Amino acid sequence: MDAYDWIERVLRDPSAIPEAAEHPDWRVRYGAAVACGRAPAPDPAHGPSRETDPVGAEARVRTLFRILDREEGRPLYDQPRARYPGSHDDTRMAEQIRAVRVEFDREATEEEMEAWKCRGRVRQAALFALGDLGPAASGDLLAEAQRRILGFLDETDAAVRMAAARALGRLGDPDSLRVLERLQDDPEWCTRTEARKALVRIRSASRPASRPANADGEGGP
Amino acid sequence: MRRDKPLFLEDTDALRRDLLETDGRRASLFAMLLRSVRAAPENFAWHAPFAALVTRDPADIDAARRMVRIYMEKLEPMSFCSGLQFHFWCFAFPHAKMALAFQWLCTLGAFEPDEEERIRRRFVEYHFINFFYGLRTKPDPECVDNQVLSLALSAALVGVLFGEGEAPGETARLMRDEGLARLPGLLGAMDPSGYSGEGSSYMDCVNGPAIPLAIELLERTGGETGLLDRPFPPGGARPGDVLRMVARSFMPGGLLLPWDNYGYQFGVRSTLAYGAKKTGEPLFAWLLENACIPTYDIGIGWAYDDLPWMLAWMPTEPAPADCPLAWSHDRLGGALVSRDRLRYGALLWDDSTPRIPTRAHVNPAMVLFNGYGVPLSADGSPGPTGVPRFQFDDTWRTLHHFIGTTPASNYGDGCAGAHSVLLVDGKESMRAWSDGPQHGPVDCRPDDGILSADVTPIYRENVPDVRAVARKLQLHGDCFFTLEDLFVAEDSHRVASRFLLRPEWEEAPFGVRIRTPEGVILHLAELLETGGLPGQGVHRETVEGHPAWPDGQSRLVDFVSEGTRIRRLFVAHLACDVSEAIPVTGFQALAEDGADLPAVRTALFESPVRLDLSCPAHMEAGLPVRPTWWYGRRVAMAGRPAYLELPLGLARPALFLDGVPVDLEPWAISGRLVRPLVPIPERLRDRADIEVVLRTDVPTSHYDGDGDGTIGLYGGVGLRWAQVPDRMARAEWRDGILAVDTTGGQSFRIPYPLMEA
């Protein structure tokens, strides 16, 4: 099976998540992380109100920890610089249907090249999923999820920082308020926006008597 | 994937009939497209799938198939592109369009099953890894702009293509569901005016062209029709209003409002074609016929497929003969246009981006004039070598968009000072700081020739003691405009009515006058001068390097005075000192790269090829795609001052009149936006006729514009003569009566009550 088949499989069959999470190809692990965050498919045998989850929410959370562990130490943001003779390293390449050749300013290993393609993708997907699943965890597992998410607030990739901010909002721990306030000065609008939503969500949840209509932070701007 | 019918173009029989078997503009434009595709398919690759779908010619199918294969080979090296990593939306949209082209070709049986499956899987995997990830990066529902619209539409499109029909994939279905879930909310959360605040470029080249595809996709997946003009939740915006706003941003002559840092540019066509087809509103068809340039080749949604989509949706019926162009919207402003469309004035008060205005510039009742189809006001940004006239210490932004570098750009030219607005105490860097309202009550009566806006809030945010700032633009008798300014504050301030205009100054008996290189004259006269007030005066300045287009410079004039209560009333009178053009056609033509005139002259005048320079030779007559063309013929003179009007979009041109080269440097920049008007030297006017030879390069591919698009030579050659302009001779306001006389004998006496403070 190639990466496409694996992604297809893990999205169709949640029981494949644990195996996919250990796959050497980061694309498959990305698919596994996305699949972790998806709602389990309805179980037709038990009617629409019952759902089946062969993995279980807490097991999914632990799987996400393993996926994030796997990203540790990968050279995600330490790439050679690319150059495209006859084309461009910017959006102009998007428009061009031309054969392109990439050159790098230094030798790079296969691992570095793969890391370059990956950057924060796997981490983002894992953090989104942790945010979605975290509330189903409790005790040490929830605390561990919170601790891990906090570790991504200074990530190079803004797509990861925004995912971390959103996940903190979903977990709802008031201890996150201070770091979320700091994220409101993030250079990227997406991160600032998710931080602001998370702040609203957590503050609203801690004031149940005055909960506004858009307390889940998903309302209009 | 469905293999029976091409998505969006299911009725190909009707399309083929309209494009191949009927006469008319639509069919002739398709013939133009087909000629360029067949002459150089890889250079005009974005046109190839549509051509193949229409003709079903094996050679056209082969060319289109090669294009898909080349794209497939590009994906791996493209993974390392900074653009892909940081501007993924720009890559998502063309990826989805290429996937659509692939599906079209599959309906023609263009691929063997193994290759078809391999390509299908690659499209899906690449989109999932790079662009589904990108879509999820955009906060939902807060993010509403061209980027997330592109990402959501692309995910939905790729998802529908490969998540339905034969061998549907789970990954594709996930993207389909996510994309389709976000699309309606995005459409509904757009500004009810239809303007996204992202400037003309992103409105015209991304948001506008995305709407037809989004509507067609939603109608096919949801089974409903009529979605274009249905209000979508949460904001109740109607997608059709985006199309209408795109249409309203066209000025006479075809340039769009210079709403962002890109300044003036031409508009694309497919959005108008779709609007014409779906709404039947005459404005769309009229603009398509009269304001658009068929040869304009620029990326829409980062793909050069505007011409194919225009042909897909363009009505076959002729456009209406006339159509009013005046418009207004309470949230934006509007335009007043004379019935002959020769006089155009806009007053804009759309909200700007607080703190650092990037795309949505500071336009607190900004006035803008266009005359005889030519822009008279200047707006935009300096070119890369331009002098930083409007850069401020606090308008720098660092861009985290490239690996290894974090370039900084200054967005000061989005601030008030770079626009034709009221300036207080010389604060050129004035802008909005909060998300609060930027204007107050407005009066929009474009049919009566009146637009006015109270723009006090944004001024008060910057100058707290301001009590009122208002501006009113009025068109009188289809002949001239008035612009009235009112400023009231508790403390005394130095207040300037600023105008940023195109060159060149011209001597005027009163007021300020400019004349553009195209012979269009704008005369501004201020009528309420009281004299003797401290600091009162007219300050003029030549601004070198700003904006980059159309002249690489501008003329700034400030009408200044100081006080707590300041009123000004301007008359803006437009005239033209050249006649309408007489077309000059039937040039002998020769493709000859790099030759000089003596070497090419004999062959040129022996050439049997006759062309009109209406568009590049490979489009006009199916000639080979060659970069350099020579055109020559003799042109009759009439013994009086004359001008040769050259086509738009000439590249590296050279003009020879009776063998003598003419310096075209004065039009080197403007020729991209406005047709050069070259005076014929006095020594040649008395000849019976003169030899005219024009050499020009033409684009040989989509990509020659390096991202900014190409015009590709358009409009032909014309001969124009000097004429005595009907200038403003006198203007006065007294006791509520406005009196304006012109040198041509027009006389106006109009009751004009000043605005109430």
Image (tube, coloured by chain):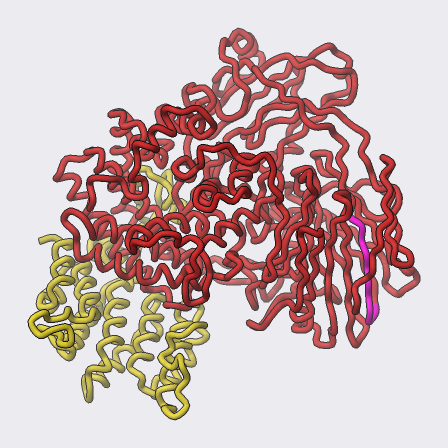
Chain colours: A yellow, B red
For the record, the magenta segment spans: B563-572
The quadrant holding residue A146 is: bottom left
Residue at image location 32% in from the left, 39% down from the top:
B9
Residue at image location 44% in from the left, 50% down from the top:
B206
Q: Nearer the viewer, residue B737 or B102?
A: B737
Specify the farthest residue to the right. Answer: B532
Residue at image location 85% in from the left, 57% down from the top:
B537
- What secondary structure do most residues of the magenta stretch adopt? strand
Residue B405 visible in this rendered orientation of the protein: no
Is residue B607 shown above or below B744?
above
Q: Nearer the viewer, residue B147 or B707?
A: B147
Residue at image location 36% in from the left, 53% down from the top:
B82
The quadrant holding residue B756 is: bottom right
Q: Position of residue A188 (x, y in %)?
A: 43, 67
Residue B569 shown in magenta = yes
Residue B756 shown in magenta = no
Residue B244 visible in this rendered orientation of the protein: yes
Is residue A171 shown above or below B439?
below
Q: Position of residue B32 (x, y in %)?
A: 43, 26
